Amino acid sequence: MKLNKRSKIVAFVFLLLLFFYIGYFSKNYFVTTNKVNTKEKTEQLSPDEIKVINQELSLIKNNFVGDEIDRGKIINGLLAGLVTGLGDPHSSYLSQEESKNFLSELDGKFDGIGIEISLEDGRLVVVSPLKNSPAEKVGIETKDVILKIDDKDSREISLPEAVSMIRGEKGTKVKLLVEKSNHENKEYEVVRDTIKYDSVKGKIIDKNNKKVLYIEIIQFGSDTSDLFDKVIQGSDLKNIDRIVLDLRGNPGGYLESAVDIGSYWIDGVIVKEKEKNGAVSELKSNKKNILSETKTVVLINGGSASASEIVAGALQDNGKAKILGEKSYGKGSVQKLEDLYNGGKLRLTIAKWLTPKDQIIDKNGIKPDIELKKDDNVDNQLEKALEISL
């Protein structure tokens, strides 16, 4: 399927292993479709399966003691359970409301605390806090494990439930008990806020009488391609010594945006998809590679995932950039987003990402050409990127 015939795909990622921005919901790669593919073979429940489902529904209706039964919530839970049975942390069912939030929050405005989480071995793990978000400001970090949400054990709730509990209106608070990387527990009370940002920021840095174009991509959202193009077109590339592309803490986003960005450097394959049947398809550059001869350094870390890994891997394989920093997260699977008849969506893993030279991204990540752990007191990674010989 050609890229221009695809609906939005998110690489989000959303990783995650299952990536969800809380109040940002997810940045993993997905393909949106307008309707269920009715040409595919229909899977039917057996009479015994239908019987036991109806039996359980009847028992609930006739015997449950508690709040009034919401049939819609029960059906949503049933649909979510079907996907949970796959044992794949990247696949999930989204209710109509969750689907709405999932799509809208990639536009760069949302209410929440600004963290992305993944589900790893049944634990909620922070992939990356959004820069300058309420979560980052209080000290929540990549690889933190969320143990409790407002005193509720996170192991007792589903990922969508966790998202729902953590998101909320500006000015309200959420309490998180977190296990840090040193295995110590710390409690945070985070005030939710409305976060609005542009996904791309650029500036000129003067270093040793040379001009460096520094470009930071926070996520691969709906505005990324246009904003990146404005930065490039507004820069005097002839007088630029190098570009530093900062993808640190970028959890992913739309695949289309990743291919767009990679195309500025590459004339050829940006990423490959390996499907269930073993077939491999190639997604190629879609515009003139005007940065092909521009010296480039790409910054990555453990919070760089999905679309970030696609771009970093493509530039690395094609010899268009030096990759500097720490090994990326390692989320390299493709999720397809299918509309369901009830207004919800099925988010299903359908393929794996490969770099142009067939590096497997999933669980492996992208290894930097120059490994350098970030100093807590100074941005030594950026300083190195400004100074290294290229």
Image (cartoon, rainbow, N blue to C red):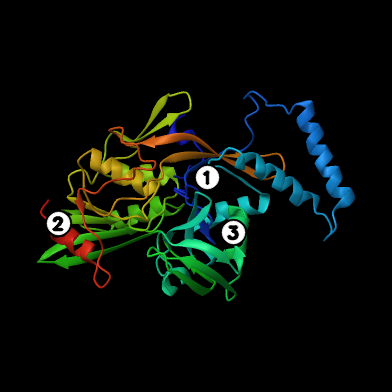
Task: Give amino acid for label 2.
Answer: Asp
2 over 16 or under it: above or below = above
Q: List x then y, in percent, for residue 70.
A: 80, 54
Relative placement, left or right, of 284 versus 70 is: left
Sequence order check, earlier mark of 2 and 3: 3
Q: Furthest-front residue in view? A: 183
Sequence order check, earlier mark of 3 and 1: 1
291 over 284 or under it: above or below = below
Q: List x then y, in percent, for residue 136.
A: 42, 69
Foreground residue among 37 and 239: 37
How many discs mark residues in the rendered view?
3
Task: Give amino acid for label 1.
Answer: Pro
Sequence order check, earlier mark of 1 and 2: 1
Q: List x then y, in percent, for residue 16.
A: 47, 49
Where disc 3 sits, the SS reads: helix
Task: Give amino acid for label 3.
Answer: Ala
Q: CA distance from mark 2 to mark 3?
A: 46 Å
Mark number, residue 89? 1
Where disc 1 sits, the SS reads: loop
Mark number, residue 31? none
Foreground residue among 182 and 137: 182
Per the image, the residue denoted by label 2 is 241
**Mark 1 near mark 2, Cβ–Cβ under 8 Å?**
no
Per the image, the residue denoted by label 3 is 162
Q: Furthest-right residue in view? A: 62
Q: CA distance from mark 1 to mark 2?
A: 43 Å
At 31% from the left and 32% from the top, the residue drawn is 358
Where disc 2 sits, the SS reads: loop
Relative placement, left or right, of 152 versus 17 is: right
